[in-house]
Amino acid sequence: MSGRILLSAATESAADRLCATARPVAGGTDLLVHGLDAAPVNLVDLSRLAGRRRPVSRLPNGSIRVSATAPLSVITSADVPVPAALADAIAEFASPQIRNRATIGGNIANGSPAADLVPPLVVCDAIVGVRGSGGRRDVPIGDLLVGPGRTTLAPGEWIEYVDLAPVHHSGFRKLGYRRALAIAVVSLAWSWTRPGSGPELADVRLAAGAVAPTVVRCTRAEAALRSLRPDDVGAAARAIQDDITPIDDLRASAHYRAGALAGLVCELPMVAAHRGGKTERL
Amino acid sequence: MNVNGTAVTGYDAGARLLDVIREHLGLRGTKEGCGVGECGSCTVLLDGEPVCSCLVLAGQAEGREVTTVEGLASCPAGARLREQLVDHQALQCGYCIPGVMVSATAHLSRTEEVTEESVRTAISGNLCRCTGYTKLVSAVLTAASDTGAHS
């Protein structure tokens, strides 16, 4: 016998109570990768909570509420669409088998700087619904991210949902070694509005993955990207270098990451044109 | 949980579903490859959806339907796919095949328009180091045309 105790949370309030003394697990696709022996002895299964709520719903203020305990494949097949950036990231996330288990809450809590779902959440100004036996709090996604594998989640807290601001245009691209099951070498999510019919942009938000200790909002590049004209795009590609602090690791050098991210910025006009509104779900 | 339609009890809820299937139930068709969700050899259906059984705790499958490669024999799409894999000589060492069969059968069972791209996406979580995938994809597409799902 494993000696492990897996308690199933049938309701949200039961999860609050059980998480006070045991570690929450939903899809388990990060927890079990580190090996069963490394997993905590006492676990609370949150995966059965997903069926109690709609995976995606529209709030009265126009935000989109996405379940943090529902499998990713359930989220993209829901009747309410999620912003294109998140849909793009889910489509490229790991593999079909992993998408049938993995959750947004797990991707946030795992705290990886290369987490695929976090850059889209950042450019959609995500508010994360956190709860536990100590109560509930709504936290801007940026305030949860501290460093590799570290978040500001307190012991006993778990993530119930994320609320995404409605965005007009958004997307996500990832560079990896292959299309499936690739951890990002560099990733970039964006959102903006188009005030006129020209190349001008407003409300630009950019977030990059795998180029800093956490997923980072790239405010200098945002300020430079006033339009999709080549001079503004070039300025943004230069400015983003001051938003990031990449390192060398087994997947790429810091130098490669910096150049590759500049390349993703330079390709934004092409990618935005190619979409032609087809995948702009909001 | 039900495994291939049979109720199963007395398993360790804190063990991996993969170990319950192979050791507790003795169903050795499901293979362990990497054990970390990268290779797809251990793919089974959980309520009809392909999952890596190395990344599911047995207790998470309680009250749910698990289908292993052995359980595909009674499913028409699974039986057709097995024939086509043989006809196309689509396996060499065979270690990945149970996982490929589970992923591909799930795809055939629920997809109206099966295309090469959709097949490649459906089996993108299953590593095969022998075939280069060409014959695997051909076998799945032929099985789909037999069912009328191939566009």
Image (spheres, coloured by chain):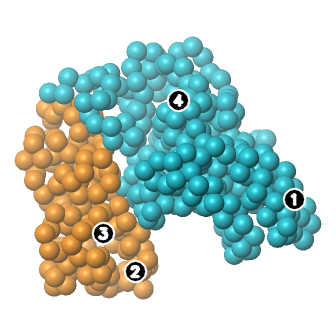
Chain containing the residue with disc 2: B
Dot label at residue A150: 4
Residue under circle 3?
Answer: B104
**What colour is chain B?**
orange
Residue at 81%, 60% (x, y): give it. Answer: A235
Q: Quadrant of the C terminus of chain B?
A: bottom left
Say few, some or many: other residues with alpha carbon within 10 Å of mark 3 (under 14 / 14 to 19 / 20 or more): many
Q: Is residue A132 above or below residue A202?
A: above
Distance, label 1 to label 2, CA atoms, is 41 Å
Please indicate whether residue A218 sits to the left or right of residue A159 in the image: right
- Of badges 1 and 2, nearer the viewer stands 1
Q: Is residue B104 above or below residue A73?
A: below
Please indicate whether residue A267 sits to the left or right of residue B38 in the image: right
Residue under circle 2?
Answer: B116
Q: Are marks 1 and 2 on the same chain?
A: no
Position in image of residue A104 (x %, y %): 53, 43
Please indicate whether residue B6 sits to the left or right of residue A92 in the image: left
Distance, label 3 to label 4, CA atoms, is 38 Å
Query: What is the quadrant of residue A276 in the picture?
Result: bottom right
Say few, some or many: other residues with alpha carbon within 10 Å of mark 4 (under 14 / 14 to 19 / 20 or more): some
Dot label at residue A226: 1
Chain containing the residue with disc 3: B
- Of badges 3 and 4, nearer the viewer stands 4
Residue type at mark 4 is: Arg
Residue type at mark 2 is: Glu
Say few, some or many: other residues with alpha carbon within 10 Å of mark 2 (under 14 / 14 to 19 / 20 or more): some
Q: Are marks 1 and 3 on the same chain?
A: no
**Chain letter for the cyan part:** A
Position in image of residue B19 (x %, y %): 17, 42
Distance, label 4 to label 1, CA atoms, is 34 Å
